[in-house]
Amino acid sequence: MTEQRRRAPLGSAALRQLIEELAESLGRSVAVADSLVRGVRASRHFGDADRARVHSLLQGRASGDVSRHVLDQGVTRWPRPGFLQGRDDLGLQPRYCVPLRERGHFLGLLMVIAPDATLAPEETEAIARATPAIVGQLYADHLLADAERAREQELLLSLLDPDPATRAGSRHRILDDGLLPDAPHAVVSVVQAVRCQASPGQVAAALSGALEGFRRTRSAHGAFAVAPDRVVLLQLADRPLETEALREQSRHILDILGTRLDASAAPVIGIGGHHSGLSCARASYEQALVAVRAARRIPALNDIGSWEELGELAVLLQLPDHALNTSLLPKPLHTLLESSGGHRLAETLRCFLDHAGSTTRTADALRIHRTSLHYRLRQIQEITGFDLDSGADRMTLHLGLRIRDLLVSLGTAGEPATTAGRGTAAARTPSAAPQDRARRTANVHPAHQVPPQRTRTARERTALPVTADGHGRVEAA
């Protein structure tokens, strides 16, 4: 889905005309960027385009490295115009930069390429004369865009409202206004950030900017609504959106947020399930909220939770926080864990249950002889008092193990919370993000990962063969 993104052109025709007139008078390339250093409008070239400008024009935004370089120079706080330093490694020549403000609001930047970091006095005067008109037009464009965005946000939030009548009314207005088509496949994603050093307005702007590119792709139509700490993205398509494409989209969004927000914002994404069109969008939204909770609480998911991959954890994560405690663990599982060698037996039990009771596949996965496996299974039965041939007993133990996994990840099971795989701000920088993301295992829940096998004890090696007393008969169909 990433390679299919298409960003709608920003800025009115009137703004473009003002920029072209200034560029013609200077004989230099001119561009206007928004507060997130995303291109709004750019003039034609005058033989001075550098690699950073070409990238911005083709992609609809500056690269993450260029954006950070620009923002690190504090341009959003400059009281007057000045020169941005160039960087050869980024393909960025120096630019004369004018902060654009209206009524105290920072709207963006006017940038003029100046390879020698100098301008003649008449050039700076021409820029100063053109700036008020550019600011006025940019502000008018913002007001219009804000009104359209507010309308879209109102309709989308109403579509996700708990009240069926409100949802039905919103659906009719969305279709009447032509905001979205009623395509057969709908998926809602929720991007959430926590309180951080950035202001709520900056967080909301960063969230909005990260989602802007997914309003429309080749494969889907989209709309989003922004709240102070989260943004909701609804996408509709004629064909089901592939899980890996949605993950790729989520990784891209997290990478963008990593360049625009402090690490303390810790953004996560929850992807809801696929549902039938606008009328069922709320169901996907509710699932996305659960998936967000999973992404926030389970480090192994690497900040991206998908409802369709949560399995039974999707049910457990709908419990309130105060209910997620060790009291949920079945007493027989407690007894097993507290017994001698209990954790090894618990992992054996997990592997046995994950392999649908197949002793052959379980022994292969654990890399032990079937005789040793039968011995362990007999120990588990004796300690728990449960019959592993009983479907009800198996379900109780399997669910108990899943609850324990969740409690361990939350750090509420009397064991340290796992931190492996938790994405950090450093891991989401462009230099580290591809390698970090490539190592993701979020599509495999930690409960399904087979732990390293310990060396068998002497007692296990000398154990007498156990006849197929029910355990050996339980093979997957």
Image (cartoon, rainbow, N blue to C red):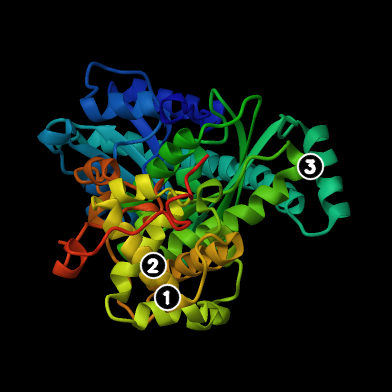
Compared with residue 54, is residue 404 higher up or lower down, i.e. above or below? below
In percent of width and height, residue 273 lies at: 61, 45
Please, what secondary structure does the residue beneath circle 3 have? helix
Disc 1 residue type (three-letter)? Glu
Residue at x 29% of width, y 46% of height: 364
- CB under 8 Å between callouts 3 and 2? no
Q: Which of marks 3 and 2 is in front?
A: 2
Residue count near mark 3 (Cα–Cα under 10 Å), binned few <14, some 14–19, many ≥20: some
Residue under label 2:
378
Q: Would you place residue 396 above or below residue 311 in this image?
A: below
Q: Describe residue 321's horizontal placement relative to residue 301 as left or right.
A: right
Label 2, label 1: how many angstroms apart (C-alpha)? 6 Å
Asked if the residue at tag 1 contacts the one at tag 2, i.e. Cβ–Cβ closer than 8 Å, the answer is yes
Query: Horizontal and vertical percent for residue 73?
Result: 22, 53
- Between the residue at mark 1 and the residue at mark 3, the CA separation in whole angstroms equals 52 Å
**Labels 1 and 3: the sequence-earlier one:** 3
Q: Nearer the viewer, residue 217 or 282?
A: 282
Q: Name the residue tied to disc 3.
A: 279
In 3D space, how far apart are the residues under numbered discs 3 and 2 (Cα atoms)?
Answer: 52 Å
Viewer-nearest residue: 211 or 419: 419
Question: In the image, which disc is placed on residue 382?
Answer: 1
Residue at (36, 78) in percent of width and height: 337
Q: Where is residue 30 in the image (x, y as percent from the top left)?
A: 34, 29
* Residue 84 quadrant: top left
Mark 1 vs mark 3, foreground winner is: 1
- SS label for mark 1: helix
* Label placed on residue 158: none
